[in-house]
Image (tube, helix red, strand yellow):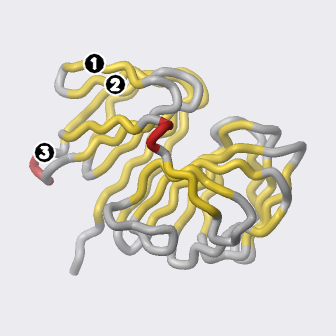
Amino acid sequence: MQVTQIAPSEFNRVPWKNGLGYTLELAVSEGGSMSAFDWRLSIATVAQDGVFSDFSGYWRNLILLSGKGIELTHSNSPTNILNQPLDVARFDGGAVTNGRLINGEITDFNVMVNPDKYHLDVQTFNGEMSQTLDVKDILFCYSPDEAIKLTVSNETSNIPAGYLVKLSALSELEASKIHCEGRGVIIIQLQRKEVN
């Protein structure tokens, strides 16, 4: 099992595709760029109403981190209203999506994936959580405000608030379990799809 801690100082500040703001890119698949990747994790502040960038070919999970909330209307799916911390909206990145702020700016956590390459499972835990999790290919743990206690192979580490931890199974035979404890935690599980 490979365990990597990514500090906030290592996040990359990159412009939005539509040029209307900036995002902090926490992690991206190997060789990935703004326009082509298998998966990507980022954090953005939305300060005004507007149309989201077009990410056709990708599936998006948008998680509210802070602020009073946002309403998302999509061209091909029902409206999402995020008004509680760690509320999640799941939608097609190619949809025409408009964001309307409910009461001032918000910060959100974005997970985008190429659905032809990976299965994606995103879970959020607004209160205390203590769970044993399977690491199939790649698993991320993140908490913006609280430290996370992570136990891997009977070794326990405290991950500082705001750090992203990436756990990678080095082979199919190595897929194993980890234990995660914390508050306000986001868990992202990525599993490669079989190539026919």
Q: What residue type is labelled 3?
A: Glu
Residue found at the very far bottom of the displayed protein: 196
> Alpha-carbon neighbours of circle 2 within 10 Å: few (<14), some, or many (≥20)?
many
Residue that mark 1 sits on: 156
Q: Earlier in the sequence, mark 3 or mark 2?
A: 2
Q: Is residue 66 visible?
A: yes
Q: Select label 3 or label 1 by which is in front.
A: 1
Residue displayed at 25% across by 49% down: 136
Residue that mark 3 sits on: 174
Q: What residue type is labelled 2?
A: Leu
| Alpha carbon distance from label 2 to label 1 | 5 Å
Which percent across, then down, holds residue 160? 45, 23
Please give left or right for residue 60 compared with residue 132 in the image. right
Q: Nearer the viewer, residue 46 or 191?
A: 46
> Alpha-carbon neighbours of circle 3 within 10 Å: few (<14), some, or many (≥20)?
few
**Image disc number at residue 94:** none
Which percent across, then down, holds residue 55? 58, 73
Q: Earlier in the sequence, mark 2 or mark 1?
A: 2
Residue displayed at 57% across by 58% down: 14
> Alpha-carbon neighbours of circle 1 within 10 Å: few (<14), some, or many (≥20)?
few
Are the residues tagged 3 and 1 within 8 Å (C-beta)?
Answer: no
Q: Is residue 8 above or below residue 63?
A: above
Q: Can residue 130 be seen in this view?
A: no
| Alpha carbon distance from label 3 to label 2 | 18 Å
Residue found at the very far left of the displayed protein: 173
Are the residues tagged 3 and 2 within 8 Å (C-beta)?
Answer: no
Please give left or right for residue 104 compared with residue 114 in the image. right
Q: What element carries label 1?
A: strand
**Image disc number at residue 150:** 2
Q: Nearer the viewer, residue 196 or 166?
A: 166
User: What is the tally of numbered marks visible in this picture?
Assistant: 3
Q: Is residue 164 above or below residue 131?
A: below
